[in-house]
Image (tube, grey):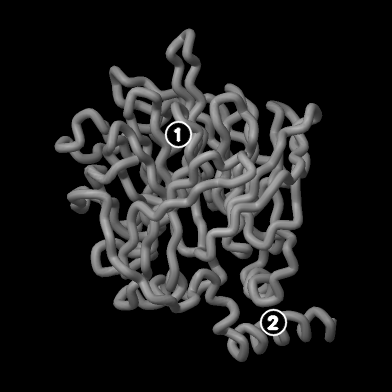
Amino acid sequence: MAVKILVPLVAVIVYFVFRPRLQFGDQKKTVYNHVPGACHAVEGVVHGSEDIVRTRDGLAFISTGVRPAPVITPDPWFLQGVGKILLFDFKNPGDGVRELKIDPEEKSEGLEPHGLSLHENQESGEIRLFVVNHHKEGDRIEIFQYSKSSATLRLVRSVQRPLLYNVNDVVAMGTDSFYATNDMYSVRPWAKRLERFLSPSWSNVVYYNGSDAFVAADGFALANGINAPPSGSPVYVCDTGRQAVQVYRRRHDDSLQLEREIHLATAVDNVDVCPDTGDLWVGAHEGFARRVEDRRNPSSSQVLRIQTPAGASPEVTSLYTNDGRQLNGSSVAVVYNRRMLIGTVHDTLLYCDVTVPL
């Protein structure tokens, strides 16, 4: 009994004494603002646009309303968001966003969406949206079928497994299979705080083949965003703790073999893969934890483009950087025909025209 009392007590003391080390992504550095063209906030998005995925013809799905992780004591304002999936048409950016209906409607009640992924069937035209849902009864992956005519997401199946316990992001590998990241190993809030301080690299990637789940790769400091090209390989994982994008080769048994690491010296969040060029678009931020604790604190934003990411010498370019006065805590960027959306974890959504050379 004494041990059970002592462990959480030590964790609390460690948390408050060494709190600066818990502020992942909070390294202070000089930020020089620059934009790729004219940018403006998209109306109707105030409680986050944490992840964005798009179809080949420019329909973007956006998750909003995710709550702060329990490793941070949040500003109460950040707890007011309501979980929704929004739609944005890159071909008609002036139309802004609209909320998609969930079928059956009662499934929208417990929706707290985080990471997203799309599976497009090029022959049938079917679009499936994979959604990380922090449901009150445990994390799960919801698989929806999108109906363009009714602007509806119809739930096809819900996947909940013991290995999916701290899910951050997902990448579809088929109509029912996927890789998903667990950004932490611990489940209890006090243990998560201690894990964030000690940084034991217990985070992992799980593969689900439609019936069974297993750990495909582990040893991450904080496995965050995950994505892959339409071919399904390589698989890219953002390790926020290491400030890097890791490139994995997919083995025949669907486990992942680390090929190389692209160090970016910033708190990487989500990664999008351009289906046409294979370029990566990475959303990153600094000062994020301070921002969540008090929304008056700015969090910087950055969008990086990585060309030939699976090659021996990837080329990294910064397309957007802001000190927080225009955009706070960017988490993702998606580009379509020289138009770009930049999402944030808990704040607004930014639209930019890309007029610089690409």
| Residue with the most extreme top position | 123
Q: Which residue is nearer to you in this view: 302 or 113?
A: 302
Q: Which residue is mark 2?
A: 11
* Percent position of residue 263, x then y: 59, 58
Q: Which mark is residue 125?
A: none
- Please tell me whether mark 2 or mark 1 is closer to you in this view: 1
Amino acid carrying mark 2 in the image = Ala
Quarter containing the C terminus: top left
Amino acid carrying mark 1 in the image = Cys
In the rendered view, would you say 157 is above or below 71? above
Q: Is residue 48 left or right of residue 212?
A: left
Q: Which mark is residue 274?
A: 1
In the rendered view, would you say 130 is above or below 345? above
Residue at 59%, 52% (x, y): give it.
245
Quarter containing the N terminus: bottom right
Image quadrant assignment for residue 145: top left
* Percent position of residue 300, x then y: 37, 67
Q: Which residue is nearer to you in this view: 325 or 71?
A: 325
Q: Is residue 310 left or right of residue 270?
A: right
User: Is the residue marked by circle 1 packed among few (<14), some (14-19), or many (20+) residues within 10 Å?
Assistant: some
Dot 1: what SS? loop
Dot 2: what SS? helix
Do callouts 2 and 1 mark residues in contact (Cβ within 8 Å)? Answer: no
* Percent position of residue 277, x then y: 46, 31
| Residue with the most extreme front position | 313
Image quadrant assignment for residue 105: top left
Q: Earlier in the sequence, mark 2 or mark 1?
A: 2
